Amino acid sequence: MLETNKLISSQYQQLQITQLSRLLSKQMITIQTAEEIRLVNTADIIYCSSAINYTHIWLFDKQKLVISKTLGDFEKQLKHPLFFRIHQSYLINILWLKLFKKGKGGSVIMVDDTKLEVASRKREAFIKHITRLESFL
């Protein structure tokens, strides 16, 4: 009976992950760089970083896009629960988060091994956010 419950629980979690992946994979956004207008799947975005009035978008395929929007404007365009603003300079995709290192504010290590600082004032909200998502995933 216990093994059956574990199997059902595992299958349910896999179904939730599949549904979440489908939801995310269907969300395409338009990104306009100086050279092109590109449709990008939000699932491909690892993180974004601020450079004053520009935003650098780091993609899973190791490409970096530069757009002439502030990080705040780009964050509004995304409007997705899997993206979290961990610092005034960083917006991350939780799906590509490898680990969170505790500390004053802490830091995150992304799947590409990039280390990003978490602002002290964002730490608690970030922990709550990833804890809530954990129950969904």
Image (tube, rainbow, N blue to C red):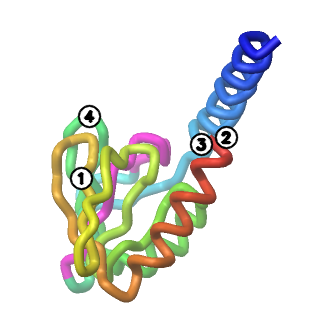
Tell which tag, 2 or 1, sits nearer the viewer: 1
Quadrant location of residue 93? Answer: bottom left
Q: Amino acid at mark 3?
A: Leu
Tell which tag, 1 or 4, sits nearer the viewer: 1
Measured as percent of width and height from the top left, residue 120 is found at 31, 85
Measured as percent of width and height from the top left, residue 33 is found at 29, 60
Q: Nearer the viewer, residue 88 or 97?
A: 97
Do the residues under discs 3 and 2 have CB atoms within 8 angstroms? yes
Q: Badge 1 is on which residue? A: 109
Q: Badge 4 is on which residue? A: 61
The numbered mark, 3 or 4, whose residue comes first in the sequence reads 3
Q: Is residue 13 magenta?
A: no
| Magenta stretch prevailing secondary structure | strand
Span shown in magenta: 38-51
Q: Badge 2 is on which residue? A: 23
Quadrant location of residue 107? Answer: bottom left
Instruction: Tell me how far mark 4 sits from mark 2, CA to CA.
Output: 20 Å
Measured as percent of width and height from the top left, residue 50 is found at 25, 75
Q: Amino acid at mark 2?
A: Leu
Q: Is residue 44 left or right of residue 137?
A: left
The numbered dot on residue 24 is 3
The numbered mark, 1 or 4, whose residue comes first in the sequence reads 4
Residue 91 drawn above or below residue 7: below
The numbered mark, 4 or 2, whose residue comes first in the sequence reads 2
Q: Is residue 45 magenta?
A: yes
Instruction: Tell me how far mark 3 sits from mark 1, CA to CA.
Output: 21 Å
Q: Amino acid at mark 4?
A: Asp
Tell me what residue is drawn at x 45 percent, y 52 percent: 94
Instruction: Tell me how far mark 3 sits from mark 4, CA to CA.
Output: 17 Å
Instruction: Tell me how far mark 2 sits from mark 1, CA to CA.
Output: 24 Å
